[in-house]
Image (cartoon, rainbow, N blue to C red):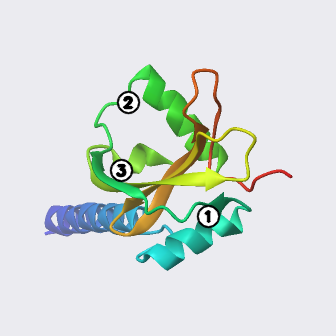
Amino acid sequence: MKNLNKRSLFLSLVAVVILLTVILSTAVKDGGMVLDSEEKRRNYVASLKITLSDEPPVVQNIVIPSEFSEVYERYNELQKEAGFDLWEYRGEYAVQYSYVATGFADDTVKVNLILYKERLIGGDVSSTRLDGFMTGLVPKKD
């Protein structure tokens, strides 16, 4: 009888650990800022002190790679610097909104927002020039 109680306790603990893992995994994935409208997305970018053109964004479905290449690892480091981490979204479908930014010396600057289930999980501000730049979603320095 004693072994049965120990086994039941052990199995109960394993079940609790699995349940907590699932709950925390879901909480991480659902933890971003909800940007479920064009107005909210544009307001978020404005909060970064970046002005967007009136052009509508280019919207495309993307997949966060299941396995990160060296380039994607570096991109994710950029995300981490801005408070995001794409690691938890490996293999997931997401939507990328690409906007044309104004107010930069370079007229090829884009703001890319990556959303998972309408929640912001990452993105970047980048110039499409060959000698351009890329930063995370951090406020623009005047």
Above or below: residue 62 compared with residue 3 = above
User: Residue, x 43% and y 68% (percent of image)?
Assistant: 119
Residue 117: give x, y in percent of width and height.
33, 67
Identify the secondary structure beneath mark 1.
helix
- The type of residue carrying mark 2 is Phe
Nearer the observer, disc 2 or disc 1? 1
User: Residue, x 42% and y 44% (percent of image)?
Assistant: 87
Q: Give the residue pinned by disc 3.
A: 89
Quadrant in which residue 5 is drawn: bottom left
**Crowd band around label 1 with a 10 angstrom C-alpha radius: few (<14), some (14–19), many (20+):** many
How far separated are the C-alphas under marks 2 and 1?
27 Å
- The type of residue carrying mark 1 is Val
Residue 15: give x, y in percent of width and height.
24, 65
Quadrant in which residue 8 is drawn: bottom left
Horizontal side of 87 relative to 75 (left or right) equals: left
Q: Give the residue pinned by disc 1.
A: 45
Horizontal side of 80 relative to 115 (left or right) equals: right
Mark sitting earlier along the chain (2/3): 2
Looking at the image, do the residues carrying marks 2 and 3 touch, with CB atoms under 8 Å apart?
Answer: no
**Crowd band around label 3 with a 10 angstrom C-alpha radius: few (<14), some (14–19), many (20+):** some
Residue 131: give x, y in percent of width and height.
64, 21
How far separated are the C-alphas under marks 3 and 1?
22 Å
User: Residue, x 33% and y 62% (percent of image)?
Assistant: 17
Mark sitting earlier along the chain (3/1): 1
How far separated are the C-alphas under marks 2 and 3?
11 Å
**Crowd band around label 2 with a 10 angstrom C-alpha radius: few (<14), some (14–19), many (20+):** some
